[in-house]
Amino acid sequence: MVLHVESHEAVIDVIARDRNNLPIANLAANEFQVYEIPRHGRPISRRILYIRTIDPGRKNEGADGSSDFHVSTGAVCALDAVLHYQIAIPASSDPGYHTILVKTTRQHVNLVFRRQYYVGLNRKSVTAKDLKRLVTPDALEEAACYHSLTPPTLELTATVIEARGGNSTRYSVAIKPESLNDIGVYGAVPRVQLDFGVCVFDTDGEVARYLHSSVDHRLNSADMERLRSRGFVSLLEAPGSEPPALARLAVLDRTTGNMGVVDVSRPLPVAFQKSHGEKRKKLIGDIRAFGSVTPAEDAFCGDVYELPVGAVSLYELGEHDPIGSIYTNTLDVPNEDITHVGGIPGITHSSVWFGIDYYGKFYVTQPGEYAFELQSDDGSILEIDNDRLIDLDGAHPVAKRTAQDTLSVGWHSIHVPYFQGPPTALALVLQIQPPGQTMRPFNLNEFVPPATKP
């Protein structure tokens, strides 16, 4: 789940489930209560400005109008897979982290939500020490090629305005009007001072190139009028005759240290994944085998978490913010030593104390009883259609368990949360045995609807 701040609102994403672990879709605004928890004193009740129910089947919001490109910000897997609510409350004016509590008056309902939201600095509150810490070339590159070290607070949108027929792909990146205060536009002398970073990823999710540029522009009255309706728009370029599989665009305001990040990607089609997978050398004992930052169709989508040293349960994922998403068509990471292995490009430098919350869907053409085998080091869980089949939670050496489930023809959901704790080994292998067949790695590319005749 992701909690973000838009203008003076804190928008809380909340998943509600019943005693059978099924999402609840009919909670009303008057059944929710939101409190802010100060460091000292009693909880403060916060007014709910509005509430929206978000359908998990929705298409990516903010897409540029072309089915070839997807625009997204932050970790998206849980939000794109599970029905949830967006609850808006007035955001605090004080910079920093703010702790919240969400309750419901309806009985036997479990709520999952982020426990904090973050408010960025402004020109009045920022200090020279803050700027020295936040406004650095390393911070910009880290946000573009891995993840931002401070929560992004600038709301961005991006479109591809020139995709083919040249030597580069051009992106129009806009800081939305509601974020203009966060870059100090409305100061005594209107001026924009921004640094831009562009990280280009290849089809394997490896960093292909990093580029950066800057803008220092004083605004006149005509500029200010355009900003109020369009936001602050800039053009960025990524070299190459074809659009990259993924370009991550980061914007850093030099006057406040506030950051914004947006991804523009071309999800890899199943046909490409199959042909490319046959040519690519299989990764063994490598954290990159858990997935790639490059989106893919009909694949597991996993939100990645960095966990504190000593984490012992999957339930600790809910206490932290995801730092990004990865994609893979199969969970096939055999038990291996990872002493000298780095992290996942585009996500994290770490190879220990991390978690991945995988979501996916698969299509069954042959009804009947299916067997599943899950193996992991450390904890993992397998859920099919919101029904928990296997529970291997906890910090432990490699362990294996099997289960059966009767599946009908059609679409089914799959959820596999996983966490890696202490060194030096890790593993996550999910296998499936369809009726009358042998056990094999569960590859989502093999479970898609039959092709329709033209």
Image (tube, rainbow, N blue to C red):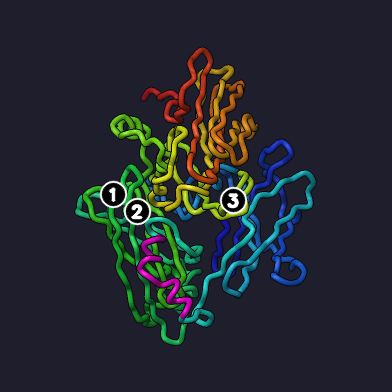
Q: Examine the rendered structure and indicate whether residue 33 appears above or below residue 243.
A: below
Identify the residue position indicated by label 1 in the image.
Answer: 243
> Looking at this rendering, what residue extends furthest in the bottom direction?
188
| Residue that carries the numbered disc 2 in the rendered image | 247
Q: 315 or 361, which lies in front?
A: 315
Instruction: Tell me if mark 1 has few (under 14), some (14-19) or many (20+) residues whose alpha carbon lies within 10 angstroms of its own.
Output: many
**Eyeballing the image, is 261 above or below 121?**
above
Asked whether residue 132 is drawn in magenta, I would say yes
The amino acid sitting under disc 3 is Gly
**419 magenta-colored:** no
Circle 2: element type = strand
- The answer to which of marks 2 and 3 sits earlier in the sequence is 2
Q: Please provide percent x and percent y for residue 184.
A: 46, 78
The CA distance from mark 3 to mark 1 is: 42 Å
* Real-space CA distance between mark 2 and mark 3, rounded to the nearest whole angstrom: 34 Å
Could you say which quadrant of the image residue 308 lies in?
Answer: bottom right
Q: Nearer the viewer, mark 2 or mark 3?
A: 3
The magenta span reads: 129-143
**Residue 53 seen from this side:** no
Res. 320 mark:
none
As drawn, the residue found furthest toward the top would be: 436
CA–CA distance between discs 1 and 2?
9 Å
Please report the residue visible at 53 percent of the width from the left and 80 percent of the height from the top. 125
Three-letter residue code for mark 2: Ala
How many residues crowd around disc 3 within 10 Å: few (fewer than 14), some, or many (20 or more)?
Answer: few
Residue 82 appears in the rendering? yes
**x, y percentage for residue 201?**
33, 50
For residue 267, above or below residue 47: above
Residue that numbered label 3 is attached to: 310
